[in-house]
């Protein structure tokens, strides 16, 4: 998918950009094709590792923290209001007196961001297209008071940052999972999609656990996790959990897998996490995870594991345990020493 709204604004002549502009693209959706900016000097900022790798593979200059200066900064509005406003503040700082273009879907709150922007700056243009809006304005430090706050303790003491999963406190599903964790988990394991570290923190309370690999794709969440969990038994990985790690190397995996991209529920993500867990586990390995009750994970589980059982649950969640990954005794997989 191209940046359809930007394409439209350029095609209609409502917006013109110089061909030799230095452009910074902040947090574009992974499926975005940056063709409308072709020929310009583009750099991309991304905190989500799969997207970071994707744009790097396409040959773009990619960073987690763009600094500029730039003539044009394009912002894709994320779901979190505070993060969206923080990106506007960053965009203005990078663009100095350049142009800030803000692009987003209605479902990600573009209307509220436009209304907020209008209270701060003079909007030079706006258009509606593809169930969303694009608008643009000259940077003038109007959003300086909206900068994304650094990771900081919330009321419950956990360190989080706006925009990360469950920034206001531990997720209900994760709390249910912690309460149901089998005390028998032992050895080395991973918390896939570990977020800001809630599950890892509790995994370290289990007497047999010797090491936890916390694997998280969101750089901001991982930074919070590094602050929440200070323990030599933990390694932190900024990585795509569906591709991370060595096959057959772990005794257990615990996870609360992601279940949506943007606002759309997407069971494929959780299914990919289950496959990855099965790949990572030793032949006698165990996966324990929580999922929303309605998510269809059972088929993938029975394809990947010899035994599957529901450990606990309620009308909202199910906590599932899966043992003995199928095919784990194939040659080439690490056998337990
Ligand atoms: C449902 S949240 C659970 C977070 C944390 N484990 C907790 O219990 O609070 C899922 C997490 O997976 C992360 N995530 C999404 N896609 C990922 C991927 N491909 N690889 C690694 N982490 C991913 C998200 O950023 C999010 O932090």
Image (cartoon, rainbow, N blue to C red):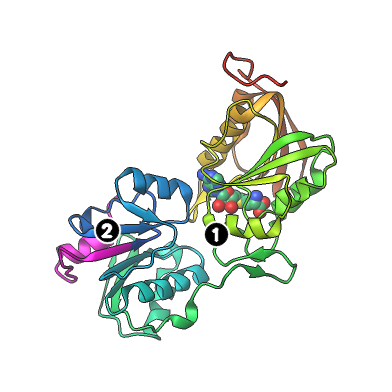
User: Residue at the location (36% across, 66% down)?
Assistant: 75
Per the image, label 1 sits on a secondary structure element best described as helix
Stretch of the chain drawn in magenta = 1-24
User: Residue at the location (14% across, 69% down)?
Assistant: 13
In the drawing, what numbered circle is on residue 166?
none
Per the image, label 2 sits on a secondary structure element best described as strand
Circle 2 residues within 10 Å: few <14, some 14–19, many ≥20? many
Q: Nearer the viewer, residue 109 or 40?
A: 40
Q: Does residue 179 show up magenta in the picture?
A: no
Say if 59 sits above or below 101 in the image. above
Q: Identify residue for label 1.
A: 220
User: Residue at the location (21% across, 57% down)?
Assistant: 36
Residue 214, given in percent of the width and then of the height, sits at 64, 46
Say if 165 sits above or below 102 in the image. above
Say if 258 sits above or below 335 in the image. below
Q: Identify residue for label 2.
A: 42
**Number of marks in picture:** 2
């Amino acid at each position: 998918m191209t940046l359809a709204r930007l394409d439209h604004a350029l095609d209609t002549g409502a917006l013109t950009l110089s061909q030799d502009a230095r452009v910074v693209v902040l947090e574009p959706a992974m499926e975005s094709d940056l063709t409308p900016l072709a020929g310009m000097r583009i750099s991309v900022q991304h905190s989500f590792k799969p997207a970071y790798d994707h744009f790097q593979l396409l040959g773009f200059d990619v960073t987690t923290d763009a600094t500029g200066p730039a003539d044009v900064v394009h912002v894709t509005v994320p779901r979190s209001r505070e993060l969206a406003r923080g990106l506007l503040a960053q965009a203005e700082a990078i663009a100095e007196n350049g142009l800030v273009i803000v692009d987003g879907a209605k479902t990600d709150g573009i209307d509220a961001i436009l209304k907020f922007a209008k209270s701060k700056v003079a909007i030079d243009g706006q258009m509606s297209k593809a169930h969303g809006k694009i608008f643009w304005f000259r940077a003038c430090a109007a959003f300086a008071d909206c900068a994304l706050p650094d990771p900081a303790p919330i009321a419950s003491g956990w360190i989080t940052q706006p925009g990360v999963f469950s920034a206001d406190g531990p997720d209900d599903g994760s709390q249910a999972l912690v309460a149901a964790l089998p005390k028998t988990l032992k050895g080395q394991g991973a918390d896939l999609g570990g977020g800001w570290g809630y599950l890892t923190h509790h995994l370290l309370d289990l007497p047999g656990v010797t090491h936890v690999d916390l694997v998280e794709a969101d750089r901001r969440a991982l930074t919070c996790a590094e602050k929440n969990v200070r323990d030599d038994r933990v390694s932190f990985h900024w990585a795509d959990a569906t591709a991370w790690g060595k096959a057959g190397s772990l005794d257990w995996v615990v996870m609360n897998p992601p279940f949506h991209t943007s606002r759309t529920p997407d069971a494929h993500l959780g299914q990919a996490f289950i496959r990855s867990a099965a790949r990572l586990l030793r032949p006698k390995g165990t996966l324990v995870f929580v999922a929303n009750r309605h998510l269809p994970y059972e088929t993938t589980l029975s394809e990947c594991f010899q035994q599957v059982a529901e450990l606990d649950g309620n009308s909202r969640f199910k906590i599932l345990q899966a043992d003995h990954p199928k095919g784990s005794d194939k040659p080439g997989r690490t056998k337990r020493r």
